[in-house]
Each structure stands twice: as structure tokens, then as C-alpha cells.
Amino acid sequence: MIGKCRSSLIALLLFALATAAQTGATQSRSFAHPDVDSMTVLGITLGRATLAQVRAKLGPARLWRDGDASTAEMKVCYVSRGPDAVAIVFASNTEMAGPPESEVTDVKVVELGAYKDRSNCRDLTISGDKVRTTSGLGLGLTAQRVRGILGAPTTTANSAWNYFWYVEMPMPPTDKSYRYWLSRKEECFEGKEPFFTVSSGIRLGFDGDKVVSLILSRVESVC
């Protein structure tokens, strides 16, 4: 399954993924731990929850489609309370992770005033400062605090910090596509047993020293 964010984060993820494959490089961090805490917002973890589960947990927000072709996404949106209100958008790329499962591939948190689709969002009872990843990432953090949670960014550009993780995960023999990929192990996996390549990313947008946007993305691919 491959998720695609409306920002350029996924493009950067795919570039990092291709570069790693060409050079044989491996990342020192695993998606599964400890970075799962930074890929979980309001109890929803990318790659482990569907949009149906988001709606069951946070309330039946409107489900709508945005984009077209490979950029098409199904989305649900929520808005926090108070003067520091934020919009929280959960999305599923419809090309590879769409219906019927609609696995969450992207999460975006932005200041409410910067989000144009407010009419699609359902109100939450929590304040904006409560919208955090399990590790503590959220709007209003300083750059120093972000470094304390994630360390130094992988890349920086245009007032944004980007973090990438790359890991290979064995494909279980029970996977419905296992036999197909096993037959292509020489061309796709250098003779090894089939595996998924998982690339995860976090982008934080800054205004001065404060975080004003947070985007989480996860890409899973084969061959």
C-alpha cells in the first residue's frame, strides 16, 4: 500500500526510498519502535488504522474525496476547540490504500485559519494544545523541543524540517500476494524472501521558532 500526501512530503519520501535502494543504504531507525509514538495522533497510528476506525473513535465526520488519479485521497477532518483551534485531517490514498479498507496513510495538523475545508470538519471537545502525537509533537512547539523529541532533521527547506525513516519488513507467507512475489524474488528482492519497504516521514512547518503545521506520512511498497 502506498500513501500520498497533498504536500511534497511523499515525493521526498519516495526520492529517499529510491536513493536508499540504489545505494544499498539502510536507516538506523525502525518504523515499529520507537518512532511509532511520533506517528500516532489522538490514538490513531498511521498504517494501523482505517478511516472507519478514526470515525468510530473520534465521531462520524463527513467522509469525502479530494484530488484525482494517483493523488486522490479519502479524508475525514476534525476541529479542536478554543482560541488555539486546529484542524486535524486523516487521509487515505485511494490508489493503493483506499476502499474497502481505507488505511490511514497521512495525518495533517494545521492552524484552523490556514485550512480551507473547514465545512467538512466535525468539532471535537478538546483544545488545540491537546492535539499531539504520543511523543509530544504538535503545533506551538519550539525548534529546540522538536529536536528533543526527534533529533536533528534529515533535511530542511523553506522553513520546514523533514524527517525520514526507511526499513524493510518481511512479507508474511500468509499474505495473499506472497506466492506472486516469491516467484519474482530474483528480480525484485535479490533472491531474498519477499519483503515490504516501509518509508515514513514527518514534516514540521515553522513560523519563526514555532511549529505551525505538522504532516505525518507513511509509504509501503513492494518491488
Image (cartoon, rainbow, N blue to C red):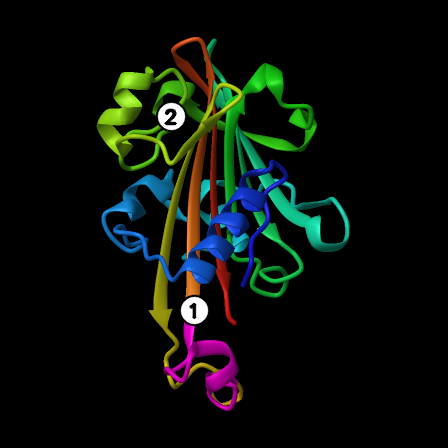
Can the viewer see residue 72 in this picture?
no
Label 2 secondary element: loop
Amino acid under disc 2: Gly
The residue wearing badge 2 is 138
**Magenta region includes residue 109:** no
Please tell me whether residue 12 is drawn above or below residue 113 in the rendered image. Answer: below
Q: Position of residue 8 (x, y in %)?
A: 59, 37
Earlier in the chain: of badge 1 and badge 2, it is 2
Label 1 secondary element: strand
Q: CA distance from mark 1 to mark 2?
A: 29 Å
Q: Position of residue 160 (x, y in %)?
A: 48, 24
Q: Residue furthest right?
A: 68
Q: Position of residue 48 (x, y in %)?
A: 41, 57
Q: Which residues are magenta?
A: 181-196
Amino acid under disc 1: Phe
Could you say which disc has been placed on residue 196 in the image?
1
